[in-house]
Image (tube, rainbow, N blue to C red):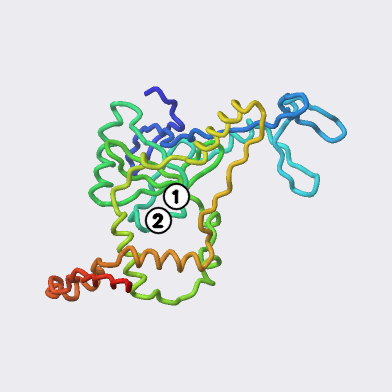
Amino acid sequence: MAARAYWQGQIRLALVSIPVEIYSATKSGAQVSFHQIHEPSGQRIKYEKVAPGVGPVDPDEIMKGFEVEKGEYVLLDQDEIDAVKLESKKTLELTQFVDASDIDVLYYEKPYFVVPADDLAEEAFIVLREALKRTKKVGLGQLAMRGREYVVSLKPCGRGMVLETLRYADEVNKAQGYFRDIGDAKPEPELLELAEALIEKKSGAFDPREFHDRYVDALKDLIERKKKARGRKIIEDKDDGGGRSGSNVVDLMAALKKSMEGKAAPAAAKKAPAKKPAAAAKAPVRKPAAKKRA
């Protein structure tokens, strides 16, 4: 495998230990990065590490410090930090199994691929993977990576497994604080049926290839046009699309209702299927245009 393992260790289930390797399952998109440039000279801005009253300092003289009081720090060497003993540094012990639906989506953070470290570990790896599939459970444990201990979940994924880091409870804001002012009013049945019809019309299988970063595409296009313009300023036209005011929402629903005219509402079709043929609208009869008087 060409990629470098993000973490190497073992998964422990009771007395069984499975040597595994973990690889990042995601990568950064094709983002457009900018540098700060000194316009008169065209030179890139550089940053130096300085100490007040001392000036620029040697990187070898920099240590990590924890502020215990204003301006007072406890200094730690990297060797001292690395020497902190933590069982989860090389072992992921599965301590609990839960239904995947029990974990709120807010807690999921980052996914990793998990593979057996060698051929000897493959049999036990497959047993654990298939057991998770059959029980439809997700394994939970704690794992130390890159100087931090994470709560993680482990679930089957094709021939392998996926480990996902989870946020701790104190890292997730309570939704009630943001949602409490939303009213309890029930939507009008007609509008709800129209919304359901639109959702049904646009339903389909998820294909991530259908989505791409349009902002990055627009920035790349701007950069190309700027190169050809030889420094001339380029300003995009402002979007005249609808805003988010309440009146626009009402207009949107009115337009949706008009576009759905002539189609039987899903609820009505279920209540009276026998009347559906009789409910067909007759073709409108056009009256002859009135003759103009001489």
Horizontal side of residue 189 vs 218, given as left or right: left
Q: Residues within 10 Å of mark 1 (few under 14, many from 20)?
A: some
- Mark 2 secondary-structure assignment: loop
Residue at x-position 51% and y-position 58%: 242
Q: Nearer the viewer, residue 135 or 108?
A: 108
Horizontal side of residue 169 vs 76, given as left or right: left
Q: Nearer the N terminus, badge 1 or badge 2? A: 2
Horizontal side of residue 79 vs 210, given as left or right: right
- Mark 1 secondary-structure assignment: strand
Residue under pointer 2? 103
Q: Which mark is residue 131?
A: none
Amino acid type at image mark 2: Ile
Amino acid type at image mark 1: Tyr
Residue at x-position 41% and y-position 66%: 253
Q: Nearer the viewer, residue 128 or 202?
A: 202
Q: Residue 277, percent across and down?
A: 13, 71
Q: Answer yes or no: is residue 60 visible.
A: no
Q: Answer yes or no: is residue 268 visible.
A: yes
Question: Do tag 1 and tag 2 residues touch (Cβ < 8 Å)?
Answer: yes
Q: Is residue 256 above or below residue 215?
A: below
Q: CA distance from mark 1 to mark 2?
A: 8 Å
Q: Quadrant of residue 278?
A: bottom left
Q: Residue 66, percent across and down?
A: 71, 43
Q: Residues within 10 Å of mark 2 (few under 14, many from 20)?
A: few
> On the rendered image, what quadrant is the C terminus found in?
bottom left
Q: Is residue 29 above or below residue 286?
A: above
Q: Which mark is residue 108?
A: 1
Residue at x-position 28% and y-position 31%: 122
